[in-house]
Structure formats: structure tokens, C-alpha cells
Amino acid sequence: MGALVKAKNQLPYLKFLLKKLQQQSKQATTLFTSNFNGETWYWLQLGSDIDKTAIGFSRARIGTKPFLIIAPTVIMIFLLPMRYVLLTNGF
């Protein structure tokens, strides 16, 4: 698991998750990071110093995939006008 270090830089998703966990659990929630096998892991620690629960997940699990949104949008931008031209010219 590696040594846990209090996270300094938080991604927007992590800020949102941290806030929601604090609201719903009504417990203090702290974000930590660690390196395990060369991979960054995030750990959300719930509870007090006496009764702690940690939830961990890999940085790769948060990865965004803008191509999956941009590619279909670009395709539709080109296909819709072509469809209009074909329909109005009787093809």
C-alpha cells in the first residue's frame, strides 16, 4: 500500500467525492495518497483517529476520456449537414 501522505492537490472529482462523503456520513473525511507498484492511489479516510475506515482506489480509475465525447460530436457536426444536403437535393 505504501506510506500514506495527506493529499495536497485534489482533482475536481475527488473534491466532490470528499464533500459528499462528509455530508452523508457526518464524519470527518481526509484524503491521502500513496504509491503502490509505481501507481498513485487515493485513500479516503472516514471517522475519527480512534475508529478509522479507509477506502482506496487507483488514480487510473478516475481517468477522463474526452475522446469518447469529442469524436461522436465531431462526426455528427459533419454528418448532419451532409444529410440535409442529400435530402434537399432529392438523393
Image: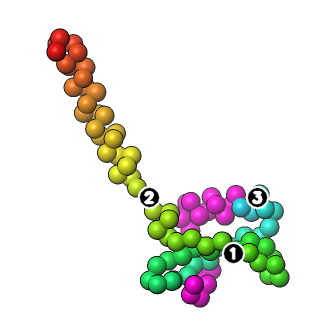
The crowd level at tag 3 (other Cα within 10 Å; few <14, some 14-19, many 20+) is few
Q: Give the quarter of the figure containing the C terminus.
A: top left
Q: Which residue is mark 3?
A: 23
Q: Quadrant of residue 32?
A: bottom right
The crowd level at tag 2 (other Cα within 10 Å; few <14, some 14-19, many 20+) is few
Amino acid under label 1?
A: Ala
Q: Secondary structure at mark 1?
A: strand
**What's the CA distance linking mark 2 and mark 3?**
25 Å
- Depth check: 56 or 28 in front? 56
Q: Where is residue 55? Give x, y as percent.
A: 66, 71
Q: Which residue is mark 2?
A: 64
Q: Quadrant of residue 41?
A: bottom right
* Residue at the spot 33% in from the left edge and 41% down from the top edge: 72
Q: Where is residue 37? Give x, y as percent.
A: 46, 84
Amino acid under label 2?
A: Thr
The mark that comes first in sequence, 2 or 1, is: 1
Question: Does residue 79 appear in this view?
Answer: yes
**What's the CA distance linking mark 2 and mark 1?**
24 Å
Residue 4 appears left or right of 46: left
Residue 50 appears left or right of 29: right
In front: label 2 or label 1: 1
Q: Which residue is mark 1?
A: 54
Residue interval drawn in magenta: 1-20
